[in-house]
Image (spheres, coloured by chain):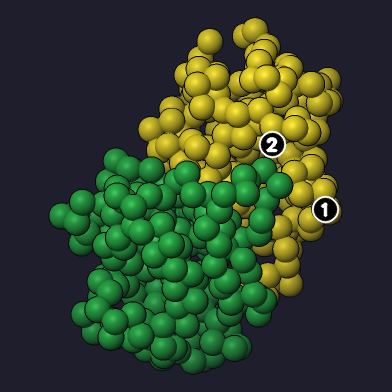
Chain colours: A yellow, B green
Amino acid sequence: MNFLEERILKDGQVREGDILKVDSFLNHQVDIALLEQIGDAFYEHFKDRGITRVLTVESSGIAIAYPVARRFGVPAVFAKKARSMNLDGDLYTSIVHSYTYNVDNVVTLSKQYLHADDCVLIVDDFMANGKAVQGLLDICRQAGASAAGIGIAIEKGFQNGGRLLREAGVDLYSLAIVDSMDADGTIVFREH
Amino acid sequence: MNFLEERILKDGQVREGDILKVDSFLNHQVDIALLEQIGDAFYEHFKDRGITRVLTVESSGIAIAYPVARRFGVPAVFAKKARSMNLDGDLYTSIVHSYTYNVDNVVTLSKQYLHADDCVLIVDDFMANGKAVQGLLDICRQAGASAAGIGIAIEKGFQNGGRLLREAGVDLYSLAIVDSMDADGTIVFREH
C-alpha cells in the first residue's frame, strides 16, 4: 500500500452516492507534504517522456499540477471551466460533464498556451468516468500536441473512465485505484 | 522595481475595462519559478507572525497559496465558490461579489479547516475592490481565528480595496500596486 492509499484509509470518508471525501488533505485543505509526494511520484513515472507542459483543469487540479510542474521545471497550465471575460476569443473549447455537480461545463484553454510541439502530462485529483480528462485530451488533439500520459491521484476503478483510457493505449498512472467502497467505511484498492 | 513588476511590464497586457491580463504567467499558464519567488516574498514579510494556515479562494488563488504554504510548512486551505454536494453542511459562508464575472458568489469553507486558535495568512493573485479578501476576513471572524495579514500579488491601487484595508489597520502586503494603466500599455506602479 502506498502513501496515498494509506492516507485515504486514515482520513478519507465514504459518503452516499459513491462520494469519497478527501477534503481534509487533497481538495479543500491541502496537505502540502502529501502533494509534494504526489508530484515526486508522477515525476518518477513520466520523467523520461520529454514533458513540456503540465495540464489540468481548475480548480482542485491546480494543487496537483503545481508540484508536478515544479519537478519537471515546466509551466503548469490550467483549463478554465467557464468562458472568462478576461480570456481572448482565441480558445480551445471542449464540453465536459461534471459528475460531482451534475452539470455540463465548457472547458477552455487559450491557444497561446498549448502548441503542436508540446508534450503534455495531464494531471487531476480525481477520475471517475474520465470526462474531464477526455476534455483535456480533446484540447490536446485540437492543439496538435502529444499527450504523453495522465497522472491521477485517486481513480474510481468501479467507474469506466480508467478502463476506456487503458484500452485506448493511454499511459494512465493512478496512485490509488478504488475498486469498491462502502458507506460503512470499507475501501478496497486495486493491487499494484 | 521588483521581479513581479518587471514581469508585468514585460508580459502583462492592458485590456478595455481596467483589465490587466497576466494569463501567460499567473492565472492560466503558471510560471512556477515566478510563483516560488512570490511564495518566498510573502514568507519573508510574514515569517514572524506565527502563521498556522494559508487561506485563499478558488481557483487562481490556489497557485499562489501552494508555494506560500510550502514555505511556512502549514496547510493551504481554499474556500470554494459554490456549495458543493461533497461538502458537509457545517460551513462558514460569505457573499462575495466578483468584479471579473459581475456575479455574486457564495464562498464557503468547511468549519473543520479553520479554528479559533488559527493564525491565518490570506493570499490571492489579484485585489481590486477587495471583496474576495473581505469575504475571507469575514470567514476568519466567524471562525474566531486571527488574520495575521494579507499577501496579494497584484493590487489595483486605483480601486479602493487596498485603501480600506490599510485604513482598518490590516497588514496588507501587495507585491505590485498598479496606480494607473492605459489601453496603450502604460502601467504605473506605486513606489515602495
Residue type pointed to by label 2: Ala
Residue type pointed to by label 1: Val
Badge 1 or badge 2: first in the primary sequence? 1
Q: Residue at 54% of width from left, 67% of height from top?
A: B94
Secondary structure of the residue carrying tag 1 is strand
Q: Is residue A166 left or right of residue A56?
A: right
Q: Residue at 40% of width from left, 73% of height from top?
A: B154
Label 2: how many residues lie within 10 Å, few (<14), some (14-19) or many (20+)? many
Q: Is residue A180 above or below residue A90?
A: above
Percent across and percent down for residue B114 are 41, 50
Mark 1 to mark 2: distance in Å?
Answer: 26 Å
Displayed quadrant of residue A82: bottom right
Percent across and percent down for residue B121 are 32, 58
Q: Is residue A141 above or below residue B157?
A: above
The quarter of the rendered structure image containing the N terminus of chain B is bottom left
Secondary structure of the residue carrying tag 2 is strand
The quarter of the rendered structure image containing the C terminus of chain B is bottom left
Percent across and percent down for residue B51 are 26, 52
- Number of marks: 2
Residue ID for mark 1: A103
Residue ID for mark 2: A147
